[in-house]
Amino acid sequence: MSHPFMVYLETHVVDYCNLNCKSCSHFSPLAPHEGFNSPAVFEKSLKRLSKLKIIIGTIRVMGGEPLIEPEITKDYLKVARRRSPLSKIHLVTNGLLILDMDESFFKVLADKSIIVDITSYPPTLKKREAIVEILEEYGIDYNFSNSPVESFTKILSTQNNENYRNEYRNCFNQNCIFLKNNRLFKCPTAAMIPLFVSKFGCNIKYGFGIEINKIKDGWKCLEELDGPDLLCKYCIPSKREMIPWSTTSEPAMEDWIVKK
Ligand code: SF4
Ligand code: SF4
């Protein structure tokens, strides 16, 4: 008998980050610098998805920057492996704190067969050799691109876009199912947009995801996730704007909104 197959699922350990890239699609520069998400709630969500017989291909545990909370990140990774034993499990990090992790952290990565995805931001590349050395010492699989991140992309608009179905079909984020507080969202931007709206007070409308406890049928859930979100009406990937990568200590609305 076949099972509903969710190709990809990602989730945040913490919503804030130690790098604060301008135009971060997870809105991390706008997140309060405190707290973390609950591994117990994450476990409950994965348990429910497994009860619905949904098989997950890849789970990516990220942020914000997950290594700000290494103990909680370890719990997340253990939960992911326990509740979804057949999935590929990745830890996504900007790498800046990896060299500060203790032995127990690397042992969890190795024991639970976690793949570490390190994004090559310019400050990360300065530590590349040492990061690679420690991951290899513990026999941990990793992906570390050679070339530095040089640009970021803006796709948000404050205007409602009638052509949103076409835009959605061309969106690079359309298969990035995001889990937050026991709810499934179309993408991280759709899940984290409340940070943007509450900071800048604009008219962008957004949905509230699918509450996992209310899902009765795994196939229908995947069908629902296959279409555009309310927020897709405020995205125009075809008019995307590339901006040079940089960090920000004073995030502004224009960091995310395309000029048109
Ligand atoms: S490192 Fe990643 S999560 Fe952190 S601000 Fe940059 S893009 Fe966002
Ligand atoms: S809200 Fe829709 S169009 Fe915007 S990034 Fe997410 S999937 Fe893409």
Image (cartoon, rainbow, N blue to C red):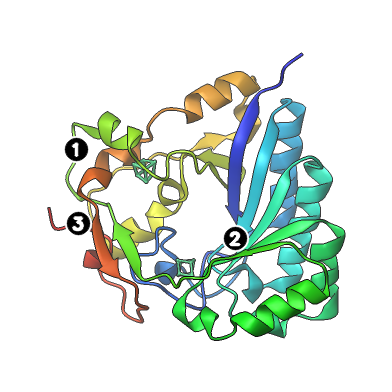
Residue 14 percent across, percent down from the top left: 59, 65
Report which residue position mark 1 lands on.
Answer: 161
Residue 256 percent across, percent down from the top left: 28, 61
Q: Is residue 123 above or below residue 158?
A: below
Residue 150 visible in the shown view: yes
Residue at image position (71%, 58%) is 115
Left or right: 215, with 20 as reference point: right
Amino acid type of the residue that numbered disc 2 sits on in the rendered structure:
Met
Residue at image position (67%, 72%) is 69
Amino acid type of the residue that numbered disc 1 sits on in the rendered structure:
Asn
For residue 258, which numbered disc appears in the image?
3
Real-space Cα separation, disc 2 to disc 3, in angstroms = 26 Å
Q: Camera-side residue: 45 or 104?
A: 104
Quarter of the rendering containing residue 83: top right
Amino acid type of the residue that numbered disc 3 sits on in the rendered structure:
Val
SS for callout 2: strand
Q: How many residues crowd around disc 1 within 10 Å: few (fewer than 14), some, or many (20 or more)?
A: some
Residue at image position (49%, 30%) is 225
Q: How many residues crowd around disc 3 within 10 Å: few (fewer than 14), some, or many (20 or more)?
A: many
Residue 234 percent across, percent down from the top left: 26, 44
